[in-house]
Image (cartoon, rainbow, N blue to C red):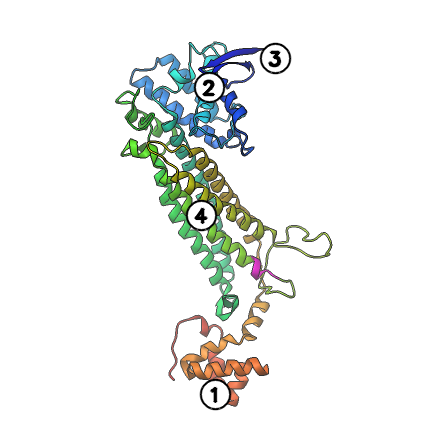
Amino acid sequence: MSTRIEHDFIGEMNISNDLYYGVQTSRAMHNFHMTGRKLQNYPFFIQAFAQVKKAAALANKEVGVLKPEIADAIASACDKIIAGEFIEQFPVDMIQGGAGTSTNMNVNEVIANIALEILHHEKGEYKFVHPNDHVNLSQSTNDAYPSSIKVAAYGKLTELLQAMEELQSSLLKKSKEFEHVLKMGRTELEDAVPTTLGNTFKAFACYIESSIKQITLARESMTFLNMGATAIGTGINCHPDYKNVFEKKLQEITNINFQAAENFIAATQDTADFVYVSGTIKAAAVRLSKIANDLRLMNSGPRCGLGEINLPKMQPGSSIMPGKVNPVIAEVVGEACYEVIGNDTSITLCAERAEFELNAFEPGIAYALFNSICLLENAMKTLSDKAIKDLTANPKACHDAIMNSISIVTAFNPYIGYEKSSSIAKEALQTGKSIKEICLERKYLSEEEIDNILNPETMLTPHMGVK
C-alpha cells in the first residue's frame, strides 16, 4: 500500500494512502487505549460533528473568510459523512486527554481529505484544503467539540423519548387489561391493603410519563451552543458575524432550534448542562429499575412465589434444573439501569473538573452520556417488547392472596377502631382462624357488615365508617 508523509509540529509520519485521517489522528490512536470503544462506534456523534462542520463552512463562506469552492467541498464532504459514509475512518478512543482535540482533528482530517478528492486532489495535499486552516476555520476544539456533543445528545434524547413513549403506551394497555384484577398491595415486602393489577401498571406508566416530561425539558439545555467562542469564549480568530450566521446554518441543516449561548466564556467552561441531562436520565433509570424489579417479584414462582403475573418465557433458566425459567428481561433491564446510575457519577465528576476557562474532561462526559442514553433507550425497548406486551395475569393467585391476608383487617379500623382490629389480627396469627370468624365470635359486627367491609372492591376506594 502506498503512503504519504504528513507532519505536525512534533514531526513527520507515514500515513497509508487508503486512510482519510492523518497524522494527529494516528498519534491519538497510539496514545489512547482506554475503552476499546472508538468514535466509529458512535456514528450519531460523527454525524453531529459533520453537521457542525458543515454549518461552520457555510457560515465562513457567507461572512467572506472562506473561498466558496473550498467551503462547498467541505460541505459536500460533510454530507457524505452525515449520510453514513466513511464511519470507519474515525478510530480514536472515546476517552482521551486534550479536551476532545483528537476527536476534533480526526473529524477535520477526514473532512479535509474527502474534500480534496471532491476537488480532484490527492489526500494530504493540504495546501488546497487544510484540516486546521479551512475545516477548523473560526473554531476551536473548545467550541466545536462540546457543541457536537450537544447536537448528538439532542438527537439521541429524542430517540430515547420515543422509546419511553412506547413503553408508557404498553403499560397503559396492561393497566386497562388488568383494571379488574384484584391483588394484594405490599409495603416493605409485607401484606398491606388490596389494590388492582391495573392500578399497579397505571402507576408504572405514570413513572415513565413523569420522566418523559423531565427529559424533554432537560433536552432543551442541549440547544444552547458556544460555537464562535473559539479557545476560551472571547471569539479570537473569528469573524464578528460568524456566530449568528452559524446559528442560522445549523438550524437549516438540523431543523432544530440550536442557538448561541448567552455568555460564551461561561458556556466554554461550564458543563453542568450535561449533569442536568444525566440527572434526568438517572431518575428515569431508577424508575425503570423499580418497575423491572417489581415485575420480577410479582412473577416469582411458579408455585412457591407470588405468581401474580406471568412474564413471557424467553429462554431456559438453568443448566441443571429442568423446567426452570428465569425473568431474564427484568434482570437485564436492571443491570442496564445500574450502569446508567454509575455513568451519572462519572459525568458529575468530569463536569466538576472544569478548571479556569475550560473543562478538559469533556470526552469522559461524552462517553458516559452517550452510553447512558443508548443503554436506557435499549432497556426501555427491551422491557416493552419482550416483557410487557405479552405479559399475562394470574387473577386467582392474586385473589387468594387477598383472602388469606391478615392485613385486610385494616378495613375494620373505621368501624371498630385500631385496638380491636389489632387484637383480631393478633389472634388470627396465633390461631390460624380467619378475620371474619374471629370478628363474629366477638360479636363486633354482623356477618352482612363484615362481608360488605371485606369486599375487596369496597377497600379500593376512600370511605369512612362510623365507630
Q: How many residues crowd mark 2 within 10 Å: few (<14), some (14–19), many (20+)? A: many
Secondary structure mostly seen in the magenta stretch: helix
Quadrant of the frame with the C terminus: bottom left
Q: CA distance from mark 3 to mark 2?
A: 20 Å
The residue that disc 3 covers is: 1
Q: Earlier in the sequence, mark 2 or mark 4?
A: 2
Height in image: 307 above or below 7?
below
Q: Amino acid at mark 3?
A: Met
Q: Earlier in the sequence, mark 4 or mark 3?
A: 3
**Which label lies toward us, 2 or 1?**
2
Q: CA distance from mark 1 to mark 3?
A: 96 Å
In front: 215, or 275? 275
Q: Is residue 351 in the magenta section?
A: no
Q: What stretch of residues is rendered in magenta?
A: 296-300
Quadrant of the frame with the N terminus: top right
The residue that disc 4 covers is: 282
Residue in the image at 47% along x and 63% along y = 199
Q: Amino acid at mark 2?
A: Glu
Query: What kind of element bears circle 1?
Result: loop
The residue that disc 1 covers is: 446
Q: Picture quarter containing residue 253? A: top left
Q: Amino acid at mark 1?
A: Ser
Left or right? Give the position of 227 relative to 345.
left
Height in image: 317 above or below 458?
above
The residue that disc 2 covers is: 109
Outermost residue on the left side: it is 240
Q: CA distance from mark 2 to mark 1?
A: 87 Å
Query: What kind of element bears circle 3?
Result: loop
